[in-house]
Image: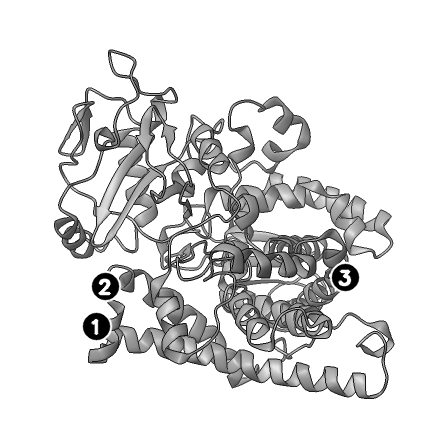
Amino acid sequence: MRRMSIRVTGRTGAQGACGSRHVFFGVAPQKALCMSAAGTVVDGKSEGRKGAQGTAGRKRGVDGRVRSFEEIPHTGRNSWVNLLKFRREDNFKQLHKHMERTFNALGPIYREHVGTHRSVNIMLPSDIGELFLAEGLYPERMTLQPWATHRETRQHSKGVFLKNGEEWRADRLLLNKELMMSAAAKRFLPLLDEVAGDFCQMLQARVESEGRGKEGKRSLTIDPSQDLFRFALEASCHVLYGERIGLFSSSPSQESQKFIWAVEQMLATTPPLLYLPHRLLLCIGAPQWTRHATAWDHIFSHAEARIQRAYQRLSSSQGRGSETGAAGGQYIGVLGQLMEKGQLSLDLIKANITELMAGGVDTTAVPLQFTLFELGRNPEVQERVRQQVRTSWAQAGGDPQKALQGAPLLSGTIKEVLRLYPVGITVQRMPIRDIVLQNYHVPAGTMVQVCLYPLGRSTEVFEDPQRFDPTRWSRSREEGQRGEGSAFRSLAFGFGARQCVGKRIAENEMQLFLMHILLSFHIGVTSTEDIKTTYTLILQPETPPRITFSKL
C-alpha cells in the first residue's frame, strides 16, 4: 500500500508500504493490570516498578540472569476477558492512549493477549535496534487477515502488503525501482509539484471569492479535511496512473468521492474484524464483514477502471511506435512504467497499484491536517520554515528537487508531525531468532510491536517531547543524539527492507504541499487547544481542526 502508512501484513503474504505506513491491535485496558513477580500494578498504579518514563535501563533480577518470557509484565492472562473489556470500554478508538498508559504503568516492555492475538510491545530505540537485527532477509509482520480474506474470497492477487517470504522479496525489489530509488523520485517529483501548485491556486481563488478582508489580503477559515483528501487522491492518481482526475473543480466526480468514502469505510471496519473469525462472519453474512468487503470492492473497482485506461493509453502509444512508451518521453506514472517493463504480471501490478492507492489518501491527508494545525498554533515555527522555503525556492529556479533540498525544515516539520501523530501507531516484526529485550527472553517467531505514539512522546527518547520543534531533526542535533538505538527514533514509515514502499511519494507529496502553502498563505487556527485523537486503523483527529488561510 502506498505510504502504507498502515504497517501490517500477513503470513499469507507480505506487506509493503507504509505507508506507511504500521499498526493494528492492542489489549484491553484494565483497572488492575497484571504483572509477574518483577512488580505489581494495583488499580492502574505501579508498585515496585517505575513507569516507562523513568526506566531506560534494562530490568535484571537480583541474580543478574536473563528473565524468562513468562516474566515479562502483562496486561491480563485471560484473552477473552481482555477482549470483552477492550470492546466494552470502546478502546479500539483509543488504542494509542491505552498503549501509553500501559507503558507508564508496566515499564518499557509488556505482553498482551487479546482474543486470538498475542504480542510483546516495546517502545525504546535500543530495543527496536535489537529487533531490527533479528528481522532476517524476509521480514514478517502481523497479518491483516480481513484484507487477506477479501483477496482470497474475491480471487484477487495479493500485493506486497499481503505477502511474505521469497515471493514478497522478489516483488518488492521490482517495486523499489519505481518507487524508492532516487531516479524514480526525480521522475515523479514534477507531477507532485504540479498538483500541489494547482491546489494552492484553487485555494487562492476560493479565499479571494469567499474570504473576508481587503481584496488581495483576504482570509478564509475552513475545515480543510475534505480538500486535503481530494489533494491526496489527485496526487496519487497523477503519480500512479499518470493522469489527472480533476478533483479541484467546483464539482468533483461522484466516482472519486465514492473512492474516498470506500477508503475511510475500509479503514474504520478493519480493527474490530482483527479479533473475530472472518470465515464465520463471511458465511453468516455478518453486516460488519459485508461493509468491509463492500468498501474493498469499491476500491478495486475504482483501480480497475484507471488501470484499464492506462493500459489502453500504453497500447496506443506502443502501436504508434513510441520507443519511450510515453508521448514525447513524458513520465507515464508508476503503473505505466511497470506495464512497460513487463517484469510483473498484470494481476500483480493491479494488486500492488490498488494497495498503493488505498494506502495513499488518508495516510497523507490526515498528517497534513495535523501539520496545518501545529504550524498554525506555532507561528514562530511557521515563519522560520517559511523564510527557509522562500530562500530555497528563489534559488531553485523552479526545480522542485532543489527547492526541497534547500529547505530541510520542510522534512523536519513532517518528521515532527509524524512523531507526535504517527499515522499507523505500531510497526511489527517477528524475529527469526531468539532475542533479549529489556533482559527478557523473547522467542523467535513472537509478534513484537513497536509502539510509535508512546515512543514519540517519551521523555526518555526526546527532550521536551510535547514541544513542536522541527529543528530537533536537523543534522547537527541528530549527530548529537548518536548513541544506542538513536537511528530508531523516527519510524513513521517503518524500518529496514519492509519500510513503507510509498515512503518517497508520501514524503515528497507532503513537503511540496507545505512548500506551496507557505509561499502563498499565513496559517492560523481558531483554537490552540490540543487536538483529541481517535484510532481507526490510522490515527486522526476526532474533529478536524479549523484552519485560517490568509493570503500573503
Nearest the viewer among 327 and 154 is 154
For label 3, the crowd category at 10 Å Cα-Cα, with few meaning under 14, some 14 to 19 and many 20 or more, is: some
Q: Where is 16 relative to 425, above or below?
A: below
Q: Which label lies toward us, 3 or 2?
A: 2
Give the distance between the C-alpha atoms of the residues marked 1 and 2, in whole angstroms. 9 Å
For label 2, the crowd category at 10 Å Cα-Cα, with few meaning under 14, some 14 to 19 and many 20 or more, is: some
Q: Position of residue 459 (x, y in %)?
A: 42, 27
Mark 3 vs 1: CB contact within 8 A: no
* Residue 18 visible in rendering: no
Q: Position of residue 191 (x, y in %)?
A: 73, 66
* Residue that label 3 marks: 187
Q: Is residue 196 left or right of residue 482?
A: right
* Residue that label 2 marks: 276
Mark 1 vs 2: CB contact within 8 A: yes
Give the distance between the C-alpha atoms of the residues marked 3 and 2, in whole angstroms. 43 Å
Element carrying mark 3: helix
